[in-house]
Amino acid sequence: MEGSETRMGGSREAFPETVWFTQLSGDGPVTEERRAALDRFILRYWRPVYKYVRTAERASVEDAKDRTQDFFHYLIEKGILSRYDAAQGRLRHFLKGVLRNYLSEIRRAEGRQKRGGDREALSLDVSKIETERFGRERDRCAPDELFDRQWAEDLLSRAVAAVRRQLEGEGKSHFWNVYQAYVLSPGPGPSPTYRDVARDLSLTPLQVQNSLQYVRSRLRETVRAGIRESAGPFQDTDPEMSALLQP
């Protein structure tokens, strides 16, 4: 998932998380910093929006991609994010309400307005979204639920990828190898034990235990930072942490 980018300036993952929302909700010229904030925002929310549109509208893949693209242009061009009030709830709940109203408005205006035009296109790779699982989910899950599920999956996926990069960059790949062997790699059949992983990686069971604790601690820190960024400013991260990292 980390490789999917927009074309509205490219990927700028290093943008400071304490600044990005202020840049998004402000007015004025599109500076380099504001464009980076827009990229970051779209990268975090386009998949949940796409799944919502695909489900709520029973739209085709191409129509859902168009609607998703139009929605982000609408948010940006109309300055909708400046109306978000953190005291009224989380950012994604605000976005779902705006999206619901937007789709209702579009349905009423269908045929009376032209979409697209000269707007800069977003590159939306839906190949990993359009799965058999998603097809089944569309039949039994509400659009809001699919939005939240995809938001959570994306956040966890980014956190896992970020921790792996960090550990590899710090020369601590051995910690990651233990986490991958114990948590990410097991297939059908019984889950591996500490002794199984220790034997395969030439470690002791205690080293396996310590490595898992270390990686999980790093993941919790990274997930909390992602929640803080995606939920909107001044939001309590504890309830989201409990839901995302439950056993």
Image (cartoon, helix red, strand yellow):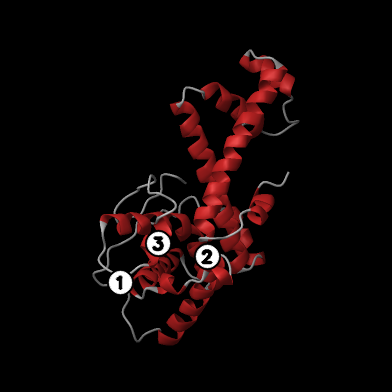
Image mark for residue 116: 1
Instruction: Locate residue 131, reporting x and y percent.
Output: 55, 53
- Relative vertical location of residue 36 with respect to residue 95 in this rendering, above or below: above
Residue 54 appears in the picture as rendered: yes
- Badge 1 or badge 2: first in the primary sequence: 2
The residue at 46%/25% (across/down) is 170
12 horizontally vs 119: left or right = right
Residue at mark 2: 91
Type of residue at label 3?
Answer: Thr
SS under mark 1: loop
Residue 154 appears in the picture as rendered: no
- Residues at discs 3 and 1 in contact (Cβ within 8 Å): no
Instruction: Locate residue 194, reporting x and y percent.
Output: 72, 23
Image mark for residue 157: none
- Badge 2 or badge 3: first in the primary sequence: 3
Q: Nearer the viewer, residue 212 or 17?
A: 17
SS under mark 3: helix
Labels 2, 3: front one = 3
The residue at 65%/53% (across/down) is 238
- Residues at discs 2 and 3 in contact (Cβ within 8 Å): no
Residue at mark 3: 22
The residue at 37%/73% (across/down) is 79
The residue at 39%/71% (across/down) is 75
- Relative vertical location of residue 227 with respect to residue 163 in this rendering, above or below: below
